Image: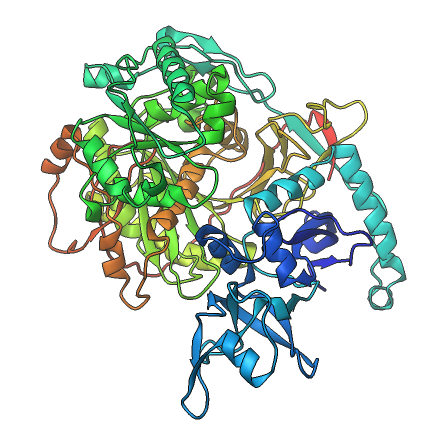
Amino acid sequence: FKRAVYAVPRQSIDIGRGHELWFGLFQSALLGSRPYLNVDVSHKAFPMGAPVLKVIGDFNRGQVDQVSGWVQQELHSFLKGMDVVYTNPTTRMAKRMRCNGLREPASQQMFKLEDGTRLSVADYFARKLNFRLRYPNLPVLHVGSTVRSVYVPAELCDIPAGQALNKNNPEECTRDIIRYAATSAPERKRKILDLASQIQYNKCPTLLDFGITVGNEFEKVPARIIDAPPIEYARGEKIPPQRGVWRAEGKNFIVPSTELSKRPLRWRILNLDSYTNEATVKKFGEMLQSQAMRCNVQMEPFDMAKTYVLVRDMRNCLRDIGTLLQNIKREEPAVTIVVLPSRGDVYAKVKQKAELASERIGLLTQCVKGMTVAKKGTDMSTLNNIMLKINAKTNGTNHCISQVAVPPLGRGKVMYIGADVTHPLSENEPSVVGVAALYDLTGFRYNCSVRLQGARDEMIRDLENIVQRQLLLYKQYNGALPERIMYYRDGVSDGQFAEILTIELQALHAAIARVEPGYKPAVTFIVVQKRHHTRFFPQPGCPTEGKNGNVPPGTIVDSEITTPDRYEFYLVSHAAVQGVAKPTKYVVLYDDSNCHPDSLQALTYNLCHLFARCNRAVSYPAPTYYAHLAAYRGRVYIKDRRINMNDLENAYRDIQIIDTREEFKQVMCSQERTHDDPIRLPVFQEFHPRSCTELSGTVGSRSELSEVGWNRPESSGVCQS
């Protein structure tokens, strides 16, 4: 059966940008202590059935006579890959065709007739079809085969309703989808039960023929809540999280970055948003510097004459972004805060210009949206979050887990590795690999690596060289290799478990063997899964969290709905800001350190409190989060760049990161390159800038799966799944 089906809405719910919201039912079968049917509410944005002219007006603030450059880019992205219906103005015959995007205006887009005559699209319709276009300045649609030049006017096209497209939704649509989908736990539960009753599974002839019936209530499963670890700041000050959050505004960081550099942090503010005025930036800068002092980060005093970078030509600032950043670089700031406009894809341009070696600038940036500066530029919580990022990016340590809460599994020399792969929507772009590896003993600072590989390839092909290099850096920083490696792998489905063990576990062991003869650390291989539809609803009388009635952070379910032949558990580590909290599923595929379930669960929960960007527990472990962000940054680096899929080695070189800090140079001077490491690959240093030159290589094949038993204590609560 289909995993998700959607019903045509009785009343359209407009969520902007030419989309409407459809509700549906998700369903999948899974095996726990017995067979289960996983049922959930599903939400999806569908392109709204409407004339293309209406869509243009929606994107262009009601104007349809002509469109500006950035509006045309958004329309191109919206229409590309979508079916449109073209209606011939003379015969009134309609034809449905695939749209390949927008081209030049109808009055300018030329094409050849069969006799070789060149005409514009507007002239063709006027002369051949005796139809004068009302909007000749609108871009035409390229339809049909991509190798043929078939252009049709926008005003003669309609978008048919009900197209389920595999495309990323605009931010505005995603925001509205979340608003409609984010109901309380009791409301979500009621919706699911209503949907299940409408399906009437037990009247299905096929299920009856197999003797299968489906229950009409949620399964009750045993659950328990583990304590959140105390968070430690400078001078041993401990803060216990309350409901997944802890207040730490003004608390001194464990290691301020300026304590390492032994000098005040030089910084600059570059404003690229024409809607953010100088007075707003001035207030923001003064408040940020004041907040830095509360955190014991010694930033240079804010001065409009020195700290603020004056942009004389705001209209062409994006065209001149390279020159602006180059001028800032001459002043050698440790970090540059870039205020971005709310519209347009400025973020990618800034990061590419500032960080890629090909641009020859090398500038550490912290981007903030102009809307944030205007509305929350004096909010203490917002300022504190920005300082969290700045201190981490400049090599400081914000906080750590108090030693009293570290389980035996996390003590000693442990390396946490997170890994993720992001995939493109087309076959003409590479998949991007992100790997983050811990290199300090407090569990806070990570090195990150980025790789490009074939489109839609989930297996990390160069993991061996990545892990080997990270192990050497760990030894260089700590004087010894890790005794235990905890590998948290994100983004793997159940059907890929055997393949990932064959490829990536072998790569881990191969990397270990190359580091040092006789070196054999304990390895635990854990898959982290977020893309599932399992939800937990508290039973009456059980603890709840927040206004939405969620299960509290720290809730663990490790029986009944878990697969009987594997070691796995669900953990709700965060307090959901809105809607029903989604638990994260952890599946242990390999373990030669004999992890006790309680210790592994506590360790994993601790790692959810070590994310540098906020003072709250996140939904999955920090190393996996960093790996995901590293892969995303790699995708930012290749945005709008032509990638030759047959020559990804050159693409690697194009997205290398430049780093000119003295500390980095000293690290690099102490490293030796070997004869089997010929190719320089990109580095990622967004979160903790100490970085290394990554090297390419290959992996072999091997498959292992350990048997790990569960010895569970008494459960302390019941929830419904």
Q: Residue at the spot x=24%, y=43% of the render? A: 657
Q: Nearer the viewer, residue 358 or 489?
A: 358
In the visual, does 375 lie left or right of 634?
Answer: right
Residue 117 in the image, given as x and y percentages of width and height: 42, 87
Q: Nearer the viewer, residue 550 or 295?
A: 295
Query: Is the residue 424 above or below the residue 170 in the image?
Result: below
Where on the picture, by quarter, is residue 315? top left
Where on the picture, by quarter, is residue 125? bottom right
Residue 382 in the image, given as x and y percentages of width and height: 48, 21
Residue 319 in the image, given as x and y percentages of width and height: 30, 46
The answer to whether residue 35 is visible is: no
Q: Nearer the viewer, residue 127 or 674?
A: 127
In the visual, does 40 lie left or right of 149?
Answer: right
In the visual, does 532 lie left or right of 449?
Answer: right
Q: Residue at the spot x=61%, y=67% of the render? A: 155
Q: Residue furthest right?
A: 203
Q: Residue furthest bottom?
A: 115
Q: Quadrant of the N terminus?
A: bottom right
User: What colour scheme governs how the chains and residues are painted in the rendered image of this protein?
Assistant: rainbow
Q: Nearer the viewer, residue 522 or 236?
A: 236
In the visual, does 246 lie left or right of 446?
Answer: right
Query: How many marks do you count on the picture?
Result: 0
The answer to whether residue 9 is visible is: yes
Q: Quadrant of the C terminus?
A: top right
Residue 590 in the image, given as x and y percentages of width and height: 45, 46
